Image: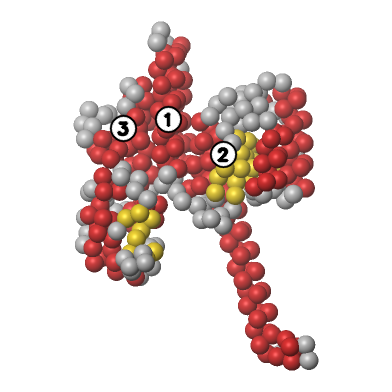
Amino acid sequence: MKPLLSPRELAHAIGVSESSIKRWIDDGLIGATKTAGGHRRIAGSEAIRFVRESRSILVRPDVLGLQELAAVEKDITAGGDDADRLFVYLKEGRAPEVNGLILSLYLGGQSVAEIIDGPFQTALEKAGELWTKEESGIFWEHRATEIAIRAVAVLRTLFSPAADAVIALGGAPTGDPYILPSMSSAAVLESTGLRAENLGADIPLDSLMRAVETLRPSLVWLSLSVIGDGKDMEQQIDRLARQLSERGVRLVLGGRAVERMDLLPRPGLHIGESMRELEAFAKGLVANSVRSEQAAFQSDRETVNESRKNPRERSGI
């Protein structure tokens, strides 16, 4: 995706006039900045947001750097529902079509969480069964997983969290080699406006805690696909939850291995069963952060107003 667009480029991409784009910018419908020479520039992530929310039709996706969408549109052989198509693309190693289909679902209005919980998960589950049905199944499965990982990476490029965005930090613990679940969690979190720091697979929880002390996140997630010594992992997670609670940091657990664990309830510990739950939790966190900022701003404004009413107090007289 192109990082910056001119109004003319966005106009060409969605088939409208350049003057319409400029008017929508002036009306606040599209966010834009200005160059030193006074020319408007639109961030690629903002262009995607506008296309998605306005239900605009991308007549020239290549202008936005989304050539993968054209690959899907030209595929006249595809049949079945979205999950079936995605599975076929994954098995056949058709990475552009995988990226294009996922992008088209997002631009069509589905959330990242809905895509991952729905067709993405269904297609990957079918790919994961290939090794039991075909001699070359392991090859198909591994290639499909690699393509899926790259597709999630492409999806994350659609979002540009603000520099002061709420930070989320996470990964998969020691002994868990799966990369994709944690990457998917990061994509969901960034789609809600958080800044996600994904530490990847097989991360020792002590190292995760050191990262917490450095980055000071408001949320920590753990993706648990497999666990070795269940009791030891339960104790480690309980210790992590206690340490995070003491710092006011929320811990969210997810993954197919969580249901096999017997975890103690703790303040700030949340267990989710889907990406939609993670999305809802993140949206609540963002909303609370906005309300806190608004309350702080209101308090500062009231203090300033009060000091203006009492100049003698302000000057210490």
Mark sitting on residue 306: none
From mark 2 to mark 3, how far is it between C-alphas?
A: 26 Å
Is any part of residue 85 visible from this angle? yes
Q: Residue 235's x, y, as percent?
A: 77, 30
Mark sitting on residue 198: 2
* Secondary structure of residue under mark 3: helix
From mark 3 to mark 1, how far is it between C-alphas?
A: 11 Å
Up-down relation of residue 48 to residue 291 (above or below) = above
- Does residue 301 appear left or right of residue 240 in this picture? left
> Residue 171's image quarter?
top right
Is any part of residue 257 visible from this angle? no
Of label 2 and label 3, which has the lower sequence position? 3
Q: Quadrant of the C terminus?
A: bottom right
Up-down relation of residue 78 to residue 36 (above or below) = above
Colour scheme of the picture: secondary structure
Q: Residue under circle 1?
A: 148
Q: Residue 184's x, y, as percent?
A: 50, 37
Which residue sits at x=70%, y=39%? 209
Q: Residue under circle 3?
A: 97
- Does residue 185 appear left or right of residue 79 in this picture? right
From mark 1 to mark 2, how far is it between C-alphas?
A: 17 Å
> Residue 72's image quarter?
top left
- Amino acid on which disc 2 is placed: Asn
- Amino acid on which disc 3 is placed: Glu
Q: Residue 242's x, y, as percent?
A: 77, 41
